[in-house]
Amino acid sequence: MKTLVVTVLAILSFGIITAQETPVVLEDVVVSSKNQKFLNAVQDDYTPDVAREMEALAARYELNQPHTPYYLTHLDNITETDYVVEFFSTKGYMYALYDENGDISVCSERYKDISLPKPVRDQVYNENEGWQIDKNQYKSVFKNDKLIKKEYKMHLSNGNDSRVVVVDVHNRN
């Protein structure tokens, strides 16, 4: 009986010893989007949610993958290796020009009647007390790793009076 217990303990300890593997130390890896420069340039506190979603979609887009809801076109006035992809939503659209590496070199977007970001909404209401926003539009242009234009155009009304207010949010942060 004593030999049986010692034998069982020896077999179990041998199993535990052989089950221990040397840990492998892996180097730290930084994962970033292929078009991270684009996202860093166009997204900030003044970017509406619908634009954030479309910009993230454009940043992840792979030219060599078939995507049915988007339109891949080639324009005559750009190089043979560049492609324009048109992204559409119910609120607007985005045109992104991709180079041969899949990087976004130019992007133009426009959305109408969107939910305004809080800083923009607060600024308009503070500067135009008693007025209400009837319609709005957001435009953004990105070119060569830089944000060129980013603005909101709003139609305000106060009774029978109306006015158009443009808020340029480029370089606010």
Image (cartoon, grey):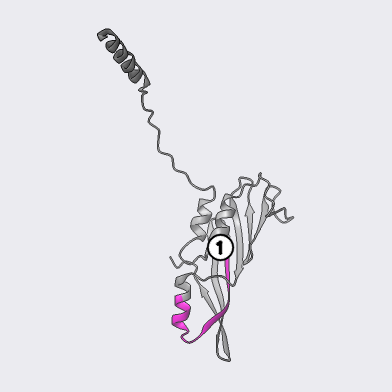
**Between residues 86 and 167, which one lies in front from this camera angle?**
86
Local crowd size for mark 1, using a 10 Å CA cut-off: few (<14), some (14–19), many (≥20) = many
Residue beneath the point at 60% across and 57% down: 106
Image spot of residue 50 (x, y percent): 56, 63
Q: Which residues are magenta?
A: 122-140
Q: Which residue appears farthest toward the left when viewing the image?
A: 2
Identify the amino acid type marked 1. Answer: Ala
Looking at the rendered structure, the secondary structure element under dot 1 is helix
Q: Work out whether 70 lies above or below 120.
A: above
Q: Is residue 6 left or right of residue 141?
A: left
Q: Residue at x 68, y 54 (%)?
A: 69
User: 65 above or below 50?
Assistant: above
Horizontal side of residue 17 vs 96, given as left or right: left
Q: Residue 126, percent across and down? A: 43, 81
Q: Position of residue 18 (x, y in %)?
A: 36, 18
| Residue 99 image offset from top left, x and y in percent | 63, 49
| Magenta residue check for 131 | yes
Vertical position of residue 127 compared to residue 1: above or below: below
The quadrant of the image that shows the N terminus is: top left
